[in-house]
Image: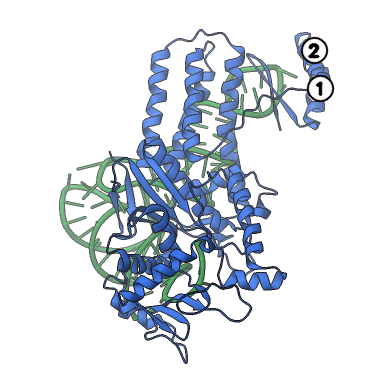
Amino acid sequence: MALQIFNSLTRQKEPFVPLEEGKVKMYVCGPTVYNYIHIGNARPAIVYDTVRRYLIYRGFDVTYISNFTDVDDKLIRTAKELGEDVPQVAERFINAYFEDTGALGCLRADAHPRVTDHMEEIIEFIRVLEDKGYAYESEGDVYYRTRKFEGYGKLSHQSIDELKVGARIEAGDKKEDELDFTLWKAAKPGEIQWESPWGRGRPGWHIECSVMARTHLGDTLDIHAGGQDLTFPHHENEIAQSEALTEQTFARYWMHNGYINIENEKMSKSLGNFVLVHDILKQLDPMVLRFFMLSVHYRHPINFSQELVDDAAAGLERLQTACFNLRHRLGVSADMGKDTENWLKEIAGIRTEFTEAMDDDFNTAKAISSLFDLARLSNTYLKEEQTASEVLQKFLDLFEELSDVLGFSFGQEEELLDADIEALLEERVEARKNRNFQRADEIRDLLKEKNIVLEDTAQGTRWKRG
RNA sequence: GGCGGCAUAGCCAAGUGGUAAGGCGUGGGUCUGCAACACCCUUAUUCACCGGUUCGAAUCCGGUUGCCGCCUCCA
């Protein structure tokens, strides 16, 4: 079964066939960097990072581009409020973005282009649109002549007239048609601005993605992705701009992830329930947040609440414990297992299960259930009195292989204990041997206070950080 | 008004024609000196409701109800 992707353009799953065999050009709309990212921004970051990892796992050569919108109205406003200039604000939140998404296990894109580094290309792009009759200047602004683009509405599946019903009509509008959107915006005095054929100004909202995608990936992308809310108008407008200019298909597969609600409510500024990744990670293991995000299919809405996060943490811990227990056993027991072939076959079967889930439009929820199957299987194996190192190692390898695709890391740093704690551990072994359970329990309690949890097994006592 | 989505156990969540994955939680049991970890069993004769198609539907069709999103800045 081939990899299938749900394409927003056709509203159905399609076999994924990149334009150039073996190579994938992927563009993900990045944030406007006027604040720390919230968990709604974290979802696409995590989801498409996982898509990318899986494509790589499947053997594709992926070029992954994700932009920063580092100039726009919100940035200008924020800079004003903070008494800084726009580049300063952008720089700070770009750094914060890397810090936050890095903690969440997201790999760096092959490039993170910024709007302000592409002014020449943007101006040139608009100029060509103007030449072709798709753009017109009006009092220093430049607008896109929406009605001229035949396919307008094909992504959001709306006809232009349906869209028009909902369009806002502003008094004294400089546009020819209320559906026309801004390509270039004349600057007000004091605002950040660039020289252009239409006077000093800055780019409109949608043009930057068309330009940066083309600059870094060429005329046709394999995958263009972003949040569901970007479908209209952002992505619709990108298509109009790019396809008017190049007369080529802009993106072949469009992916859109669902929203996040907070405690069953839409996250919004007015409700005051914005959850910033920067804040939540102070009290939440980033891997738990990632696990939580991937435990629901990316196109479905997801509800964020303390209770659900706690559930996710418990689930993730089960997987971590399974790995931990495998490592302990690998370190202490002899290499003597039976039925090795059968176990190896079962392990391999789980890889297939996982791949089939991911092939089906990146069904990470189902893929995660394969990890749980793997945990159950390995835990069952650990009940055997005799184990084979080869099998234990294969279990660990598959855990690592699959969790790496999902971007989880089950930390395994070899830690050393202080000498006095080692001494207590040894004393406890003696005490238990002598059936001095009172002393043994005393030591266990003592270490628990130091956040070291002891577990007695048939293969000796193991410890972990609580 | 237009376009679209969702409704599966206490909670979360897969599942798009073949007789309900998985996780968390619950209850019982096994293991253990006691724990912990783990394992086994338990928790939906049923998938919002009503019709229809079919040998067979959570899955397809029609209708009803409820919730949500987009059409306006937004991941």
From the image, which quarter does the C terminus of chain A lie in? top right
From the image, which quarter does the N terminus of chain A lie in? top left
Q: Secondary structure at mark 2?
A: helix
Using residue B41 as the reference point, say whether residue A334 is left or right of it. right
What residue sits 65% from the left and 27% below the top?
A413
Chain that is green in the image = B
Chain that is blue in the image = A
B43 shown above or below B51: above
Residue matched to label 1: A443
Q: What is the spatial separation of the Cα atoms under label 2 and label 1, in whole angstroms?
A: 10 Å
Q: Closer to the camera, A29 or B54?
A: A29
Residue matched to label 2: A431
Using residue A346 as the reference point, say whether residue A430 is left or right of it. right
Proximity of marks 2 and 1: CB atoms separated by less than 8 Å:
yes
Q: Secondary structure at mark 1?
A: helix
What residue sits 59% from the left and 23% below the top?
A325
What residue sits 43% from the left and 13% below the top?
A340
Using residue A378 as the reference point, say whether residue A279 is left or right of it. right
Mark 2, Cα crowd under 10 Å, few <14 / some 14-19 / many 20+, is some
